[in-house]
Image (cartoon, helix red, strand yellow):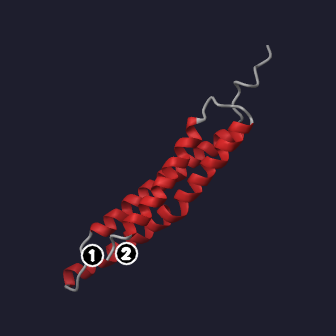
């Protein structure tokens, strides 16, 4: 039996779509970590100075995820979506679209959450 090539999803764009979702999910985790770092208190007392180190570590890890991996997830989603549209495989087109949207949301959310750190 010959498979219909229109309904067959190419493996390359599918893998890019899954990677887009993974990187975008890590970007969301980074955005939440930046929001947690923004919510931690800051001041000059001895007790709060120990919280400052925790705040900086949480912010650094969140910024690495939110600023580096979220845009990569968004770009991978856009590339995968373009490849799927060119190859006319619209069966799982929702995967790269969702990955791109979540990646861009996580990146913009990370920028907005950074404004709350003082």
Relative depth, front residue between 116 and 60 = 116
Quarter placement of the C terminus: bottom left
Q: Is residue 109 left or right of residue 101?
A: left
Residue 56: mark in rendering: 2
Q: Which residue is mark 1?
A: 51
- The percent position of residue 67, horizontal first and vertical second, equals 50, 65
Residue 20: mark in rendering: none
Quarter placement of the N terminus: top right
On screen, residue 62 above or below 101 = below
- The percent position of residue 116, horizontal first and vertical second, equals 33, 70
On screen, residue 107 above or below 16 = below
Residue 72 position by quadrant: bottom right
- The percent position of residue 22, horizontal first and vertical second, equals 53, 48
Relative depth, front residue between 104 and 65 = 104
In the image, what residue occupies the spot 54% across and 64% down? Answer: 68
Label 1: which secondary element: helix
Label 2: which secondary element: helix
């Amino acid at each position: 039996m010959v498979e219909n090539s229109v309904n067959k999803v190419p493996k390359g764009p599918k893998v890019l779509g899954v990677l887009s979702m993974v990187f975008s999910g890590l970007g969301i985790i980074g955005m939440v970590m930046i929001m947690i770092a923004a919510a931690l208190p800051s001041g000059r007392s001895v007790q709060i100075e120990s919280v400052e180190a925790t705040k900086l570590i949480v912010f650094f890890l969140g910024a690495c995820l939110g600023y580096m991996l979220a845009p990569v997830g968004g770009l991978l989603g856009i590339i995968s979506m373009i490849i799927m549209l060119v190859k006319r495989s619209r069966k799982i087109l929702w995967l790269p679209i969702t990955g791109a949207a979540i990646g861009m949301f996580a990146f913009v959310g990370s920028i907005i959450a950074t404004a709350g750190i003082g």
